[in-house]
Image (cartoon, grey):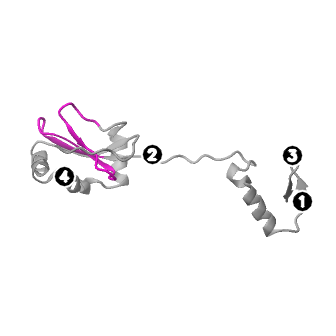
Amino acid sequence: MYTFERDEPSTRWISVVFLQGEEAEDLLSVIDREGPISAIYRLKHFDHGDETIEAALVNGYVYDAVPAGSTDHTIEPFGSPYALTYSDTFGYVSLLRRYEPEAKPTFAPSGVLAPFERTPQSIADAWMANPTAPVVATSRQRAVSL
């Protein structure tokens, strides 16, 4: 049987498509003849990007791990955002995709500079832009340009 390892951990998975019965039988035959990667390529057309994400979120088809039972085969191809789960015993095929929720931006409180804005290089760049600006001592007794 095929064994693939995931190239990077993923925190969430969304369901792209779940087929069972006659619809799944065709794909199970493809897996037997051509391998699971061929089935992934055939099922990818069910992925409609943001629309698929929204549908999965609304319907609760979001998982912390690839859902699989004891009789399931799970394939996570290296470098692919997809995972294929299938069961010959129960006659189904499922395609899932990695889902990383977008991080919400965090903002520094008003009037506070973010750490990356206070690097020695940024201070030097500011001074080079206006070398005639007054120079004052900081709390560490270093001269900076204002």
Which of marks 2 and 4 precedes in the sequence?
Answer: 4
Q: Residue furthest top?
A: 70
Say few, some or many: other residues with alpha carbon within 10 Å of mark 1 (under 14 / 14 to 19 / 20 or more): few
Q: Amino acid at mark 3?
A: Ser
Query: In 3D space, how far apart are the residues under numbered discs 4 and 3 (Cα atoms)?
Result: 65 Å
| Residue under pointer 2 | 101
Q: Which segment did they paint magenta?
A: 67-96
Proximity of marks 3 and 2: CB atoms separated by less than 8 Å: no
| Residue under pointer 4 | 39
Query: In 3D space, how far apart are the residues under numbered discs 1 and 2 (Cα atoms)?
Result: 46 Å
As helix, strand or loop, the secondary structure at mark 3 comes to loop
Q: Residue 106: give x, y in percent of width and height.
A: 60, 46
| Residue under pointer 1 | 135
Proximity of marks 4 and 3: CB atoms separated by less than 8 Å: no
Q: Which mark is residue 139?
A: 3
In this rendering, which labeled residue sits more in front, label 4 or label 3? Answer: 3
Query: In 3D space, how far apart are the residues under numbered discs 1 and 4 (Cα atoms)?
Result: 67 Å
Residue 34's place in the image compared with 57, above or below, is below
In this rendering, which labeled residue sits more in front, label 4 or label 2? Answer: 4
In this rendering, which labeled residue sits more in front, label 1 or label 2? Answer: 1
Q: Residue at x 11, y 35 (%)?
A: 89
Which of marks 2 and 3 precedes in the sequence?
Answer: 2
Q: Amino acid at mark 4?
A: Ala
As helix, strand or loop, the secondary structure at mark 2 comes to loop
Q: Amino acid at mark 1?
A: Val
Which of marks 4 and 1 precedes in the sequence?
Answer: 4
